[in-house]
């Protein structure tokens, strides 16, 4: 009889369930999903109806087992990453593709005979063995025995084993720990572990000290401890101090070798350290009278300069401004002050939001202790300042939050900031800047685009309109020539920053202008209207993004998703829209709608082109491909493209990739998107049709050039023609600027698979800032998410609204 779990209460002991409720992240997630301590807790289900653990739940189960049964001696990240690879965190997964013929089971994919051996030979008996092996599907039981096996592997043959040995042996046995057959698994493990947000929580929800200094030995030697479960992701060293043998905190104990090398390459820093007789590998931090480590202003500015140059080069802000903010909050103490850790005083929750949602991942962030690394704190502090706003706004917003900016209430902090800023300035030019910081944007590098840019745009687009005979060529050519012949032909509007532009118009030019002014204005207005109407339809037919618009957007840095709405008036919906995409398909928000029709697809083979859109890889179609019908209206397929990882989530679960098939009505007025979620597995036949072309596109890296596309010839979509047994529908928006709303989304319930190699090929042609091209989740704002279910598959609880 097949086993099935609907609730956590069905598969865990009461004490284990209570332990889960006591984990702050888990209880917050459950309460947000509508769960209650007095009621049974629902298990999350994927689009196929299979129960699985969210990343938060998986992390909590592993953390409880490791702390309770293994004295916190195992690597939490290793446990979570292996479970991710083995089962995709699905509870009821079985796999019979092994030599023994016995199926591996559950989260950690354990063999029953391995479990029996762990109990009988090694004495792991916290959970009793049952005759029915299906008890291995229970999450705590499975993770417990998986941890026991990892513990045994870590000391195989009474030798301390490396992380690589343990992981590869877990996959293929100890005999294949060094065999090439397990190498791919090891590489996948490293990738998964890197992206898995495994944070360990200590008592009362406070993060544990991840960078604990190692006591110096009596022999005055350097002691190095490799923290496998560390949250710093650095080697932690504690180096003995001076000749008196006293312990002193060192830069090298908290900063990576690469960043230390960059510090030594700073001329002024090198002079300072040489004068104070510092040695490479043993640079001491300054201590105050209470033995608290802090850094000098010169060192702080050097850290800011390095971070901005290496990681945030597109930011239009001076390092001195960031340093002044940091000093006001932290006094330059390495550990920060009170509840604000690090030299920038940015709290962990804000930094983690920047890391997880906005894609600032040049430094690992897994614990509050990471922020005590000056470079990490500076990086996330600078990222938080990445607004294209006036200084008086973002400085005060940094102190009190963007929604609480009030010049009167924060005047004291503002004065402290101005005073501190002047101490960082190194020239009269900078000093002048500090006195007028609240009144100008130009000093920060913000300047209007040159008029030549506008002229070139109008020249190109007007020429296209003329050549297309949309308006009279002979008349408009004279007007265009008159307009483009000299910048003096028309006076510029006054610069909003106060600068005036001299106007020098000759009499002859004035006469010509007067003669043609009326017709020029009428035709210019007409042309612009026609131009934008035609171009907008063409853009929608080719791309559901901001490809046409001159304003660049990104998935990281100051042009990232959090700032899209401020990049251009055309992008306002990205910030102000109430029906934005993507969303999380939470089970409690989904309503079964029996009136929905089958989403039949019948796509025909047609000529297609593989395109590097800069922000994703897509396939554009040249002819008629096929339609879908939604509420009696036909939508024709125009293009498809991929995002990685997935933009939509199923019960907070992130998948490896997401395919968007973009459809338009005949008049190009309405958009419908069919979304397909991917997980890693067998190669996708759809992508296999152009793998060689992807490799070619990636090799050439042609984005932004005239050769950023490759003809595919006839492209067959037969593999995705079949009808769907289940899909989810809601009204949302485009997931890239301009974030146009009114888009009908249809997310298929059936997962597709693609190989790791295919996923890498889809990313290869993209620039680094677009390789992670998933927009963060948007608020549902009361919208309905409806589910279609094929009548033949309506059975059990799956057919019912969870509410």
Image (cartoon, rainbow, N blue to C red):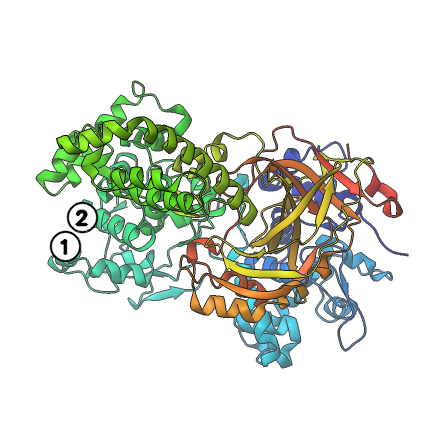
Label 1, on which residue? Answer: 268
Res. 336 mark: none
Q: Quadrant of the N terminus?
A: bottom right
Q: CA distance from mark 2 to mark 1?
A: 8 Å
Across and down, in percent, residue 655 comes to: 62, 53
Quarter of the image where one finds residue 244: bottom left
Residue 548 relative to residue 36: left or right = left
Label 2, on which residue? Answer: 298
Q: Nearer the viewer, residue 162 or 329?
A: 329
What is the residue that sits farthest to the top in this orientation? 408
Q: Which tag, 2 or 1, sits closer to the chain's start?
A: 1
Q: Secondary structure at mark 1?
A: helix
The local crowd at label 2, few if under 14, some if 14 to 19, many if 20 or more residues have their Cα within 10 Å, is few
Across and down, in percent, residue 753 comes to: 67, 61
Residue 67 vs 532, above or below: the answer is below
Q: Nearer the viewer, residue 481 or 260?
A: 481
Residue 458 relative to residue 180: left or right = left
Quarter of the image where one finds residue 196: bottom right
What is the residue that sits farthest to the right in this orientation? 1
């Amino acid at each position: 009889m097949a086993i099935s779990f609907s609730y956590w209460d069905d598969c865990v002991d009461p004490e284990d369930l209570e332990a889960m409720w006591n984990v702050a992240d888990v209880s917050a997630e459950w309460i947000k999903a509508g769960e209650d301590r007095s009621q049974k807790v629902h298990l999350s289900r994927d689009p196929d109806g299979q129960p699985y653990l969210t990343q938060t739940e998986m992390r909590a189960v592993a953390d409880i087992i490791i702390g309770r049964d293994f004295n916190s001696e195992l690597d939490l990240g290793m446990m979570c990453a292996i479970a991710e690879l083995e089962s995709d965190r699905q509870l009821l997964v079985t796999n019979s593709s092994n030599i023994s013929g016995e199926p591996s089971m559950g989260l950690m994919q354990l063999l029953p005979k391995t479990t029996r051996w762990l109990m009988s030979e090694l004495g792991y008996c916290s959970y009793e063995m049952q005759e029915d092996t299906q008890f291995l599907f229970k999450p705590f039981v499975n993770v417990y025995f998986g941890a026991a096996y990892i513990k045994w592997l870590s000391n195989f043959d009474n030798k301390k084993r490396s992380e690589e040995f343990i992981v590869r042996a877990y996959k293929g046995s100890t005999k294949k720990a060094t065999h090439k057959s397990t190498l791919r698994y090891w590489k996948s493990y490293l990738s998964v572990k890197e992206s898995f947000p495994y944070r360990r929580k200590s008592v009362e929800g406070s993060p544990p000290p991840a960078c604990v200094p190692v006591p110096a030995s009596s022999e005055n030697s350097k002691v190095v401890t490799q923290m496998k479960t560390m949250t710093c992701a650095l080697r932690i060293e504690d180096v003995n101090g001076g000749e008196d043998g006293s312990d002193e905190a060192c830069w090298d104990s908290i900063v990576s070798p690469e960043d230390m090398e960059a510090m030594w390459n700073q001329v002024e820093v090198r002079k300072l350290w040489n004068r104070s007789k510092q040695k490479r590998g043993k640079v001491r931090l300054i201590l105050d009278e209470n033995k608290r480590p802090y850094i000098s202003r010169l060192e702080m500015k050097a850290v800011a300069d390095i971070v901005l140059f290496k990681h945030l080069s597109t930011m239009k802000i001076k390092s001195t401004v960031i340093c002044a903010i940091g000093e006001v909050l932290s006094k330059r103490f390495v550990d920060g002050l009170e509840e604000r850790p690090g030299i920038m005083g940015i709290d962990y929750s804000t930094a983690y939001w920047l890391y997880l949602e906005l894609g600032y991942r040049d430094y690992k962030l897994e614990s509050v202790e990471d922020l005590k690394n000056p470079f990490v704190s500076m990086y996330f502090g600078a990222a938080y300042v990445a607004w294209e706003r006036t200084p008086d706004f973002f400085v005060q917003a940094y102190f009190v939050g963007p929604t609480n900016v009030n010049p009167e209430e924060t005047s004291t902090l503002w004065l402290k900031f101005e005073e501190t800023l002047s101490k960082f300035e190194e020239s009269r030019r900078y000093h002048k800047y500090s006195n007028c910081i609240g009144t100008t944007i130009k000093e920060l590098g913000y300047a209007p685009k040159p008029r030549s840019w506008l002229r070139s745009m109008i020249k190109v687009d007007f020429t296209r309109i003329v050549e297309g005979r949309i308006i009279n060529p002979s008349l408009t050519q004279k007007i265009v020539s008159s307009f483009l012949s000299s910048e003096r032909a028309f006076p510029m509007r006054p610069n909003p920053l106060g600068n005036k532009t001299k106007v020098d118009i000759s009499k002859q030019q004035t006469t010509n202008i007067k003669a043609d002014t009326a017709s020029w204005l009428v035709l210019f207005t007409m042309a612009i209207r026609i131009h934008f109407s035609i171009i907008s339809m063409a853009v929608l037919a080719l791309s559901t993004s901001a490809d046409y618009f001159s304003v660049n957007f990104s998935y990281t840095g100051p042009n990232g998703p959090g700032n899209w709405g401020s990049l251009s008036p055309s992008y306002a919906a990205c910030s102000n829209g109430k029906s934005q995409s993507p969303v999380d398909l939470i089970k409690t928000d989904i309503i079964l709608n029996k009136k929905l029709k089958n989403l039949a697809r019948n796509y025909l083979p047609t000529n297609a082109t593989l395109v590097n859109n800069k922000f994703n890889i897509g396939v554009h179609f040249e002819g008629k491909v096929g339609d879908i019908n939604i509420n009696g209206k036909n939508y024709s397929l125009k293009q498809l493209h991929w995002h990685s990882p997935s933009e939509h989530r199923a019960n907070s679960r992130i998948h490896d990739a997401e395919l968007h098939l973009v459809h338009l009505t005949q008049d190009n007025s309405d958009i419908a998107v069919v979304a397909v979620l991917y997980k890693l597995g067998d190669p996708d036949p759809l992508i296999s049709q152009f793998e060689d072309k992807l490799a070619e596109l990636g090799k050439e890296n042609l984005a932004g050039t005239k050769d950023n596309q490759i003809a595919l010839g006839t492209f067959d979509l037969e593999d995705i023609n079949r009808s769907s047994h289940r899909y989810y529908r809601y009204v949302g928006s485009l997931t890239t600027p301009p974030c146009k709303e009114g888009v009908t989304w249809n997310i298929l319930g059936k997962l597709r698979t693609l190989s790791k190699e295919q996923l890498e090929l889809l990313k290869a042609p993209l620039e680094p800032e677009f390789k992670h091209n998933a927009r963060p989740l948007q608020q549902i704002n009361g919208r309905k998410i409806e589910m279609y279910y094929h009548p033949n598959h309506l059975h059990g609880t799956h057919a019912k609204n969870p509410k």
